[in-house]
Every structure is written in structure tokens, then in C-alpha cells.
Amino acid sequence: MNARTKDFELPPGTAGSRLQALNDWVAEVASLTRPDAVHWCDGSDAENAALIAKMEADGTLLRLNEQTHPQSWLHRSHPDDVARVEHLTLVCTPEREDAGPNNHWMAPAEAHAKIDALFDGCMQGRTMYVIPYCMGPIDSPLSRCGVEITDSPYVVANMRIMTRMGAPALARIEREGSFVKGLHSIGELDPERRFIMHFPEELTIKSYGSGYGGNALLGKKCHALRIASHQARAEGWLAEHMLILGIENPQGDTHYIAAAFPSACGKTNLAMLIPPEGYREKGWKIWTIGDDICWMRPGADGRLYAINPEAGFFGVAPGTSRKSNPNALASIQSHTIFTNVGVTADNQPWWEGIGNDQAPATDWRGEPYDPAKRPAAHPNSRFTVSAKRCPSYSPMAEDPQGVPISAIVFGGRRASLVPLVFEARDWTHGVLVGASMGSETTAAATGAVGVMRRDPMAMKPFCGYNFADYFAHWLSFDKAGAKLPRVFHVNWFRKGADGAFLWPGFGDNLRVLEWMIDRVDGKAGAVDTPIGLLPAEADLDLAGLDLPAEAREALFGFDAAGWRTEFEGIGEYLEGYGPRMPAALRAERDRIAAALAG
Ligand code: OXD
Ligand code: MN
């Protein structure tokens, strides 16, 4: 960054920490961006109240109905700033190959120069907020800290919900002396002047021109996935795009599962699942640990232990209803920031699929609702709420040691071919299952919706380094003494000839989870096929479900010809990573392709 101290006095308060390296960086950023004031966030209620009041006064936040939704606000983003921008998201490693074909790349010097030119003077007339935060429980050895500098009070308010932010995080950073540096400015919110850049070697993020969650709340995708995946590789752990849930059986035993699905494929719904009635009566319970990100590390006993690095949910609003996710709906009754939803005439938040008898008066752009023009809520509209507000939030989510993972689940949206569930034969096969995941695209990123793309481990937009090296890192966990989780693949989105979903999903997904934990406990049967172990219909509890024969055939069947074609595609996809692709993964693909041919 270029120092500009000559024509610019650093604002008072620029040095606000006992850590010189942090003060120096804040001063360096202030001299580049030239804010009017610097505010160090302490995370207190008073600070939050003052920021909210300021945003209410300038229209950044609109207060919702205080009777029905106490302490809740609506934010309407710029209409061109509603999702992650993958084509403007860059991983800037010195060598292009280290970012890999899965990332957009720019050489670090060029990238710094390009984005620093945008940051130059961009905070004039604004306050610069310094947000110390901790990803994960504040006292967990698995947690990692960062500092985000931003000129957006909306980002501060969201980071306060999504991370452990403020004084305790600063104390840990001062103790440890190291932190991830994240610099963010909303700039002019101009899509032509927008970049989300990552410098993994420098533990640095620079994001300019967007206020949208995944682009601007730097603790989330930028730190907890892209930078953390890089740190995790160096330090022997995994940073994954996974929910974490606990399944408590009627005997009181709890198994923890981590599950990776691409964005907007129901991770929040699965993480907060309510068991179907018959299961509830027997005493089954689901505990939510996290809905989006999972950090896992081998413990002394060889098992993988996981924490949720986040402290809140940034969930997709449309489709969230009393039927699909009662726990989410209960969580967002108060103390919630809604972004880009519609509102009713009496100022309650509203979105498509909310399933109530109210009607929207105003759409997400603040115009009178007209279904011919646009939906009331943007398809990627969101709620931000503290995890502690969720009725199923597990006390174990705060455990510094994390929870032991019994099963890893991969899944995508696949209208055809892929059965409801299958189990990988072993870890190497499981890594291949994750590496070859495919899914139809959703509104969580800009671009066409509904196009099938490969999304390994649901990390395509989030892995901070070459996927071939990432697969090798996954494979490396299979070593002497390791007690690795079983690996499964699910597809809740299989469709029939009429285009309707064949599986009821939501709470009924517990039927599939039960089979998984019974497999872990050696209690459930399976049928061996070249693609893995499938349950026979009788292996799953389907009591009370009305599944016609056609649905059963599709959900539990195995279409050898279709899988032969799929494996050709998987082979071509993996070859795209060139010589860095681990030989063990190639061999595993070849083994299954041969079994399918035979
Ligand atoms: C998210 C995403 O916001 O994956 O979690 O896009
Ligand atoms: Mn996500």
C-alpha cells in the first residue's frame, strides 16, 4: 500500500490495540483509504444500539414491526449486489498452479496494485470500523482469529451476529500475535469496480465494491473457507462447507454428522431438522451445531473433531416456513437482520414460500409488490440471526474440543440418476464421492440457475487452493491410528417423469440419517453395487410414507448404464486437474468404471 500521510492526518484512535502489528496495519489502511474517523469495535450492546440507530436514521436499516418482530430490521441492498460474484473472486498465489483450475487467479503484485487503486481515498467522509473477531468458540484451540476493517456499519452489525466479535477476540489476537487481515469497502457498489481477492500466503483478504454477505462479511466464506482451507492444509486439518448436526436416539446416544451441500440446497433446513412425528414420539432429537461451515481436526483418539466457526446463521429466506424449517422460523422472530425480503402492509417480513396467510405489500426493491414484475423477496434474500436463538442449538456447539464426527455426507441437486443415498466403501472411495459431486446451480451466486456443474465437496467457490492438492490433503487423513467417519452421498432432489420431487425431504430425511448411524453402529444392511453400498428398501424405516413403486425404483435403484456415462464425465473432470491429481483418486475412479463395465 502507498503511504499518504503527507496530506492526511491519521484520525484519532487509529492505534487502539496493544499489538503493534495490528496498529501498524490499521494505520497503513487508514492512510490509504483516508476515513474521517476510526472506530474499534468492542462488540458491546451499546455500540450495536448506536450503530443500528445511525443506520435507521440514514435508511440503511428499516425497523420491522416491533410487536411481531422485536429488534428486527430490513436492509435493501443495491439491486446489483445480491449474491456472491464468483467471476470477480480471486485467489492470488505467487504460482497460478497453486490456485488451480478451480479458482480465478491473479499474480499478487498485480492484484494488490489493482485493488489498492480502488481503496485509495475510498473511505473519505466515512468511518472506518476495525472489527476483531474469532471464528469458533473464543477458548477453543481449533478457533482462528481475524480482523476485518470495513466502512460498512451493516457489515459490523452482521459480523457481530455471525462471529465472536469485539473485546474478547481482540484479547486473544493480542495474546497470539497473529490474525487474518481482511480489508473491505463497499466502494461505490459498482459491479464494474468490484473484486474479492484472497492472498493465502499473506493471510490477507481484500474486498471492494460489494456489501453482500459472502463478499463482505469476511469472516465467513473468505476467511473461514478460502483462507482457512489453506491454513488447514498446512496445519493438518480441514475447513469445509458443511453443516454439523447431532442425532440423539431414544437411548440418549448422540452421533454427530457433517454434511456438504452446495449453496441454497437445504443445509440450514437439514441442520435444524424436526423429526417426523413417529420419531419424535420415540424420543429422537436433532441438535444443531452449525449450518454452513465446519472445521475438523483429528483428536488424540484418531477421530475427527469438529467446531462450527460461526456464531450465527446467514440463511436463505425464501422457502423457509413452519413446514420446511420451524426451528429457523422460531429463531427469526426477533433480533434478526433481514436482507432483500418483501414486507407486508404492517411491516412484517415476507417471502415466497413463507407459508402464512399474509400478503406482501412491498417487494425487496421497496416498490409496490407486483408479481408480474418480480417476486416479493429476492431468491437469495437472507436472514442473519444468532445461533443461540435457535431452539435446537446444541450446547456442544460451544465446547472448545468440538464434537466427534461419525459420518460425513455429500449431496447435491440431481434430478436424475443419483439415488437417495449410498455409502462409500472406504475413505478413498469417500474422497472420490466428494470430489465427483455434481449439482444444479442456485441463486446464491450470480449466473444461470439450474445448470449442472461439478462442485467437489461443495467447495468449488470456496477452496483457497488447487483442488488436486485439496483431494490429496483429504486422502492424507487415512493413516495408521485414524478412526475416520463413514462417508455417504445423498440426493434429496430426485425428480419423477412429471418433474415433481420423489422424496418428501425435510423431517423425513431423518429416515436416511438413521440408516447412516445404524451403518456406523453395524446395525443396518446394505446392497453392494459398483457405486457403493445402497440400502435395500427394507433397510430404511419408510413407515407412514406414501412412495409409489416408480419413486421407490428411482430412489433405491441403480442404473448401471447411466452410471457408466456419469463415470466418463467424472474421469474427464478429474483429468482437467492434470498431473497434480492424486494417482489414488484416479485409480479409484478407474476401479469403479471397470466394475461398471463388467
Ligand atoms: C452461503 C453460500 O451464503 O453458500 O452460505 O452462498
Ligand atoms: Mn454456504
Image (spheres, helix red, strand yellow):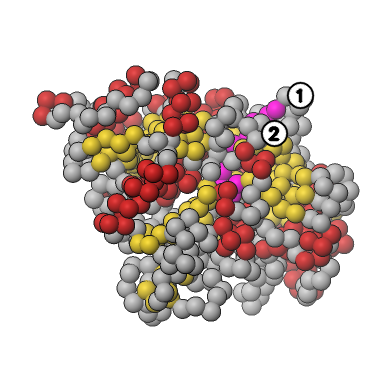
Image check: 109 left or right of 160? left
Q: What element carries label 2?
A: strand
Of residue 247 and residue 493, the one placed in the foreground of this image is: 247
Q: Does the magenta stretch include residue 50?
A: no
Image check: 189 left or right of 497? left
Of residue 113 and residue 31, the one placed in the foreground of this image is: 31
Q: Quadrant of residue 561?
A: bottom right
Secondary structure mostly seen in the magenta stretch: strand
Q: Name the residue under label 2.
A: 304
Q: Does the magenta stretch include residue 296?
A: yes
Q: In which quarter of the image is residue 273?
A: bottom right
Q: Mark 1 points at which residue?
A: 480
Of residue 97 and residue 335, the one placed in the foreground of this image is: 335
Dot 1 or dot 2, earlier in sequence: 2
Q: Is mark 1 on a helix, strand or loop?
A: loop
Q: In which quarter of the image is residue 546?
A: bottom right
- 484 up-or-down from 451: above or below: above
Which residue type does callout 2 highlight? Leu
**Between marks 1 and 2 in the image, the one whose residue lies nearer the viewer:** 2
Magenta residues, as a range? 290-299
Would the CB of label 2 be found within 8 Å of ligand 2?
Answer: no
Q: Residue at x 63, y 45 (%)?
A: 289
